[in-house]
Image (cartoon, rainbow, N blue to C red):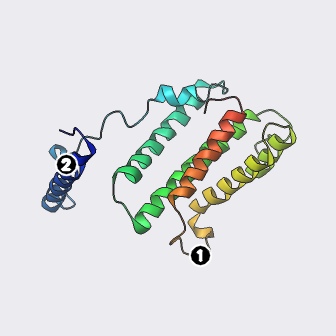
Amino acid sequence: MIDSDEDIPKVVSEINERMQALHDYLGDRNLGEAKIRFPRGYIRTCASHRHKYQFLSCHTLKSNIAYAKLTSDIYRWLLNRTDLSITAKEMMIKQGIALVGTVAETVVKEVLKGQPGGGRKQNFKKKVQKLLDDGVINQELQAELEWLWDTRNNVHIMLLTDREYNKYEIKHYNRAIKAMQSLRVALGGLP
């Protein structure tokens, strides 16, 4: 039982020892009885995620965005509650940014559907420019969305010219989330 912050180091030490013992015993084997229960209440509900995208009319699209956001909640838990570090941590951050970029792309495309400049053949940055031209977003948000898109495009490993070592930090993931939140608010959604 945890009654105060002073209890945390002992509890964490016990959890660490038991999880390591379980892993040492199992190795790469999968065993149903060895599944560790993911903490309840950390992953937000689909309804809470859908609610933030009320400006979108398509319920299926809002649901699919909510499902993607569940993945982001899992990334957030792993980054906040484990000591994942070095390159593994960076790649988790990269995937989180890519996920946020994909949601931003989807939202922008849906909002501009059927409008001049919002066609399927227009790239993301041109669509973001249209949002700027229409007064929906400001130049600061345009720059952030373009940064998000450029960073998201690092999922195309074959196009990278540099090693992805010491490249991604939590501040970059937070920047991506803030850009998406600002876009959502600019489009009439909730923060």
Q: Nearer the viewer, residue 83 or 153?
A: 83
Q: Name the residue carrying label 1.
A: 162
Give residue 148's position: percent from left, percent from top.
Answer: 65, 54
Describe the element under mark 1 as helix, strand or loop.
loop
* 3 vs 181, nearest the viewer: 3
Q: Is residue 182 above or below residue 78?
A: above
Residue 129 lies left or right of residue 84; in this view the side is: right
Q: Amino acid at mark 2?
A: Val
User: Where is mark 2, residue-wise?
Assistant: 11
- Vertically, is 97 above or below 51? below
Q: Nearer the viewer, mark 2 or mark 1?
A: 2
Residue lying at 65% horizontally and 46% vertically, measured from the top left:
179
Using the numbered discs, state the Cα–Cα distance from disc 2 to disc 1 in whole angstroms. Answer: 41 Å
Estimate the x, y position of residue 130 in percent, counting from the top left.
83, 43
Q: Is residue 128 left or right of residue 183?
A: right
Q: Quadrant of residue 58?
A: top right
| Image quadrant where one finds the N terminus | top left
Which residue type does callout 1 highlight? Asp
Instruction: Determine the residue positioned at 23% across, 47% down.
Output: 6
Compared to 51, does 91 lie above or below? below
Q: Quadrant of residue 71?
A: top left
- Res 123 seen here: no
First in residue order: circle 2 vs circle 1: 2
Examine the rendering and report whether any part of residue 27 can be seen: yes
In the picture, measured across the screen, residue 141 lies left or right of residue 94, that is right
Q: Residue at x 67, y 34 (%)?
A: 185
As drawn, the residue found furthest toward the bottom would be: 162
In the rendered image, residue 101, in percent from the top left (x then y), is placed at 61, 49
Locate the C terminus by quadrant.
top right
Q: Is residue 152 above or below residue 135?
A: below
Q: Classify residue 63 as left or right of residue 120.
A: left
